[in-house]
Image (spheres, rainbow, N blue to C red):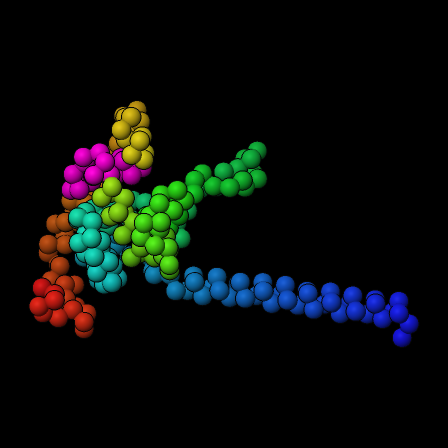
Amino acid sequence: MVPGKFDDAVRVLSFRSGRRRWVGAGLLAVLLALLVAGCAPSVPDRQQDLCAIFQQHPDWYDYARDAEDEWGVPAPILMAFVHQESSFRSNARPPRKYVLWVIPWGRVSSAKGYAQAQDPAWSDYTAERGSFFRSRSDMEDALDFIGWYNHGTSRQLGIAKTDARNLYLAYHEGRGGYRSGSWKGKPKLQSIANRVAETARQYEVQLQRCESEFRCDSWWQVWPLCS
């Protein structure tokens, strides 16, 4: 084979090899995405009933109580925040922005996951709590994040950890926005905050009725370590 033809053959083989690698990588990415989607917890069927939510996902009860123990924010308030922010969808994202009404151009914000945590707040959280294996699409991490954020809000702004309405206003507007009163000119936001508070109250009453079903239900939760 003459040098020129040999070089051409090498280039063809390299191109085909590279193409196979790209195709293989693409297929792997698709398979991983399908695997993650398949592993995502199902959305609760009855979102207004905390007992039904915990019956469908018993581990969420443990996550909520762990976050309450860590940060002092009641589990019903933590779950009411998740209900409002994502309707319990692990992959929730804000709507897209469009150029000329038809061309997708990013999203309204960087919010993501169960808690709709935005990039700056999530970065602060992982800097303090560690980022290893933490995900905004994981309910345990989302509840811990909400508890952590509201703990900081209570410490900085003096809002009681049982005051779901004002905690939510500060969560939505940011602590600086809450302090400046940006929420006062937003009646729709105030209505949403009232709804979060009402959901938290309903969840609290419901949990009192059914909590015995979920407390100490795991094999490792034994007396006197669990009661």
- The structure residue drawn at horizontal position 22% and vertical position 34%, both measured from the top left corner, is 157
Where's residue 139, x and y in %? 31, 56
- The structure residue drawn at horizontal position 31% and vertical position 30%, both measured from the top left corner, is 177
Where's residue 38, x and y in %? 41, 64
Q: Is residue 220 magenta?
A: no
In this picture, residue 111 sits left or right of residue 25: left
Q: Residue furthest bottom?
A: 1
Residue 71 seen in the figure: yes
Where's residue 44, x and y in %? 29, 57
Q: Nearer the viewer, residue 120 or 19?
A: 120
- Magenta stretch: dominant SS? helix
Where's residue 170, x and y in %? 27, 35
Image quarter of the N terminus: bottom right
In this picture, residue 208 sits left or right of residue 133: left
Residue 52 seen in the figure: no
- The structure residue drawn at horizontal position 66% and vertical position 68%, both measured from the top left corner, is 20
Q: Nearer the viewer, residue 156 or 59?
A: 156
Q: Nearer the viewer, residue 129 or 100?
A: 129
Image quarter of the C terminus: bottom left
Q: Residue furthest top?
A: 185
In this picture, residue 57 sits left or right of residue 136: left
The part of the image, by quadrant, that contains residue 45 is bottom left
In this picture, residue 106 sits left or right of residue 80: right
Q: From which residue to which does the magenta span run?
A: 153-172
Q: Is residue 154 magenta?
A: yes
- The structure residue drawn at horizontal position 43% and vertical position 62%, both measured from the top left corner, is 36
Vertical side of 199 occupied by 5: above or below:
below
